[in-house]
Every structure is written in structure tokens, then in C-alpha cells.
């Protein structure tokens, strides 16, 4: 007996109850379909060729048709997920004046809390370990100045007038350790000296910058030990360049007692120097030298001598060497009034080899 199978009828989905979405045509050859109400990509429904409806058979045939429909919807969903993001972005670009942004967009700016680079606090934290306090003892008394570590094994640059004539030199680093030091070389003409710590290692050396790039108005930080207050930080700007500053020139065997190394005057009066033909903070004596200096309004006081003038990148641009303070009726001074001077670091760098060999250029 032969089974008669009823012929299968083609299946057509019912017509949607809404008007199909129309495409947006931007230019010849480019068509963009707008997204649906859910924000994703909604492909337009197909326009089927409707035929006369016939009875839909039940049974296994219907189940097969249902599975095929689910598979079709899954394929459409995958395709929409693959292109929906790009389409939505393109539609946004075409329908909005603002540019589209993505998750990988970078917003320019500076997170101040994430870095202290370029701040006084950041410079102080970075450079303070490289600044030391120097105590120089002689038959004339004791003086206090500052110095800058330039090598990890204890080479320190300071002013000649800080250590000139000293019989004993003691250095205290920022972590409180103390060392004995010996004079390596001196250059009274430039008011520079190089000393070396005994049995030192692992010290943090400062970075020497380029003073030829310094401009008037640049922000600077000064670190030293004014009045014995180790690690004091002040800040200001570069006020002028190439100032002719004259200071006492002390040499071995002919100490006149006029340099800070001999300290025979009230230490509150600072160190003597001349500027513009006038003497300040004491008598410079008969033996003196003149050099070109950076002028700064960063507060300098007795004890800052030999310390560092630093740019906002943490580089040494000068060795603080002189300051002006007006004298009061009692003979002491009122403190810094914003007239400080520093030996340009390029002068130091040009003289460093000569200092290491025991003298100056």
C-alpha cells in the first residue's frame, strides 16, 4: 500500500502591522539603515510575494519550519551584533554635528594628583637628598654653609668662601648622617670649591642642568641650610641674568678674615659682596673677585651659601653665593629682601676638571 503525502505549501510570514523602515540615503552608492527603538541595528523586513493562503499542515513539517525560523532569527541577531556598533557610529556622525567618540578616545590634560613634576613640592622631594649642610671650623671660628652632591661617592660642590681656611670640615646629609670631608680643589676667582666625603657611598647625586637656557621669569627653587636650618626650601623666579657680583677672594696662607670661611663678623649679616660699585653685608676686603651671576628673588639667607638654585625639572642651574639684606640700627639684618645671586652651573661645569685636579682654571 502506497502512502500519499500531502504536498508541502510554501510558508510566508505574516505582513508586519507597521510601515517598513525606509533607508536614509547619504550620497550615491551609500545607504545607511537607521537603528530601531532599542538602539541596535534593525534590518528592514523583506517584501514577500504573497500567495493565496492555504491550510498549514500540522505535525513534523511544522516543527521543521519552526526550527528554520529560529535559525534565521539567530543569524540576523549575529549579523546585527557584528555591524550594529559601526552602523550606529556612522549614523551618529551623519545626524549629529559633534564627532563620535569611542572607548579608546584619549582626553588631553594633566592629572596633578598623579604627579608632582613641575611643582615646588616635587622639586624639593627630588633634590633635597642631594643637598648637604657644611660646617667649617678654623682658628677664627666656625661657619655654616651648604653644598651639592655631584657623585654617589661623595664629591660635593660649594662656595670657596664657605670652606676657605678651614682646618676641619663636617658634612651632614639630608638623612642625618655626618661625614668628615677633605678639600679637593678651590677656585677663589670663581668662588667655587670641591670637597670629598670620607668613606661615603650610595649618595644621591644632583643633576646639573644648562644655565645658558635660563630665562628671566623662570621659576626656581633654592635649597640650603640658612642659619643652620638644614634642608630649608624657598622658591621664586630668575630676576635677571649676567649680574656682575664681587665677593671676597680668600686664598690659603693669606686669609683676611673677610670670607664666610673665617666668619669674623656677625653671622646674621650674611656674606660680604659688592654690586654696582657698592658694598653689602660687610667689607669685601682688599682681595676680591667678580663673576657673572644669576639674580633671583628666592629667599636666601646666611647658610644658603654653596647650596643649589634649581629649575622646575629638578636640575641644578646655579650655586647660591651671595645675597643682600639691609642692615638695621643694631647692626644685624632684617633677612632676605629678594636680592640673591647664584653662580651659573655652566661656570661650575667648565671648572670641574680643574677642581678635581686640585685647583681652579
Image: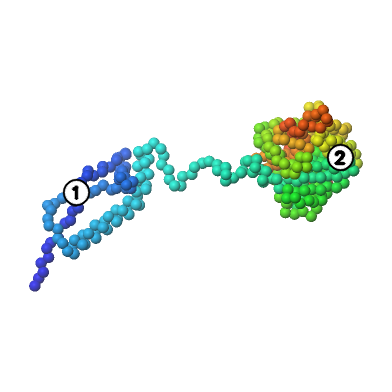
Q: Quadrant of the C terminus?
A: top right
- The percent position of residue 351, horizontal first and vertical second, equals 78, 42
Q: Nearer the viewer, mark 1 or mark 2?
A: 2
Numbered badge on residue 116: none
Q: Left or right: 120 with respect to 228?
A: left
The N terminus - image quarter: bottom left
Camera-nearest residue between 125 and 94: 125
52 displayed left or right of 107 = left
**Would residue 346 be seen by someone viewing this image from the given angle?**
no
User: Measuring 75% from the left and 38% from the top, which residue is drawn there?
Assistant: 320
Where residue 71 appears, as percent x and y from the top left, is: 27, 58
Could you tell me which secondary element the residue under label 2 belongs to?
Answer: loop
Q: Quadrant of residue 258?
A: top right
Say which residue appears at 35% left-offset and 42% top-offset: 91
| Above or below, 135 relative to 202 | above
20 left or right of 219 in image:
left
- Give the farthest residue toward the left: 1
Secondary structure found at label 1: loop
- Residue at 9% x, 70% y: name it: 2
* Foreground residue among 3 and 356: 3
Indicate the position of residue 291 as horizontal and vertical percent values.
78, 34
Give neighbour class at mark 2: few <14, some 14-19, many 20+ (Cα, 10 Å).
many
Q: Which residue is mark 1?
A: 15
Q: Position of residue 356 (x, y in %)?
A: 80, 47
Of mark 1 and mark 2, the one earlier in the sequence is: 1
- Single out the residue that lies furthest toward the top: 277
Residue for point 26% across, 43% down: 21
Residue under label 2: 262
Tell me which corner region of the image, top left, top right, bottom left or bottom right, holds residue 75: bottom left
257 w.r.t. 169: above or below = above
Q: CA distance from mark 1 to mark 2?
A: 107 Å
Amino acid at each position: 500500500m502506497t502512502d500519499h503525502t500531502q504536498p508541502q505549501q510554501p510558508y510566508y510570514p505574516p505582513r508586519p502591522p507597521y510601515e517598513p523602515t525606509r533607508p536614509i540615503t547619504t550620497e550615491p552608492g551609500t545607504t545607511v539603515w537607521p537603528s530601531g527603538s532599542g538602539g541596535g541595528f534593525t534590518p528592514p523586513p523583506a517584501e514577500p510575494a504573497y500567495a493565496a493562503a492555504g491550510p498549514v499542515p500540522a505535525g513534523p513539517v511544522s516543527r521543521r519550519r519552526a526550527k528554520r525560523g529560529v535559525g534565521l532569527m539567530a543569524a540576523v541577531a549575529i549579523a546585527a551584533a557584528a555591524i550594529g556598533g559601526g552602523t550606529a557610529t556612522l549614523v551618529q556622525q551623519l545626524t549629529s554635528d559633534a564627532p563620535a567618540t569611542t572607548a579608546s578616545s584619549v582626553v588631553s590634560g594633566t592629572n596633578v594628583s598623579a604627579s608632582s613634576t613641575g611643582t615646588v613640592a616635587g622639586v624639593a622631594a627630588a633634590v633635597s637628598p642631594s643637598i648637604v649642610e657644611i660646617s667649617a671650623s678654623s682658628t677664627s671660628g666656625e661657619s655654616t654653609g651648604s653644598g651639592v652632591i655631584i657623585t654617589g661617592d661623595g664629591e660635593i660642590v660649594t662656595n670657596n668662601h664657605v670652606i676657605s681656611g678651614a682646618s676641619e670640615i663636617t658634612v651632614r646629609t639630608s638623612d642625618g648622617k655626618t661625614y668628615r670631608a677633605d678639600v679637593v680643589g678651590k677656585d677663589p676667582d670663581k668662588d667655587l670649591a670641591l670637597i670629598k666625603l670620607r668613606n661615603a657611598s650610595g649618595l644621591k647625586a644632583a643633576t646639573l642642568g644648562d644655565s645658558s637656557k635660563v630665562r628671566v621669569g623662570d621659576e626656581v627653587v633654592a635649597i640650603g641650610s640658612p642659619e643652620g636650618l638644614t634642608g630649608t626650601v624657598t622658591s621664586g623666579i630668575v630676576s635677571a641674568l649676567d649680574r656682575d657680583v664681587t665677593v671676597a677672594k680668600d686664598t690659603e696662607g693669606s686669609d683676611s678674615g673677610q670670607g664666610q670661611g673665617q666668619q669674623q663678623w656677625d653671622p646674621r649679616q650674611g656674606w660680604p659682596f659688592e654690586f654696582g660699585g657698592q658694598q653689602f653685608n660687610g667689607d669685601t676686603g682688599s682681595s676680591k673677585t667678580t663673576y657673572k651671576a644669576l639674580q633671583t628673588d628666592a629667599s636666601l639667607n646666611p647658610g644658603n651659601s654653596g647650596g643649589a638654585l634649581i629649575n622646575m625639572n629638578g636640575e641644578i642651574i646655579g650655586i647660591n653665593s651671595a645675597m643682600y639684606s639691609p642692615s638695621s640700627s643694631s647692626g644685624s639684618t632684617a633677612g632676605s629682601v629678594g636680592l640673591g645671586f647664584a653662580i651659573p652651573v655652566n661656570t661650575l661645569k667648565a671648572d670641574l676638571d680643574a677642581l678635581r685636579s686640585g685647583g681652579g682654571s
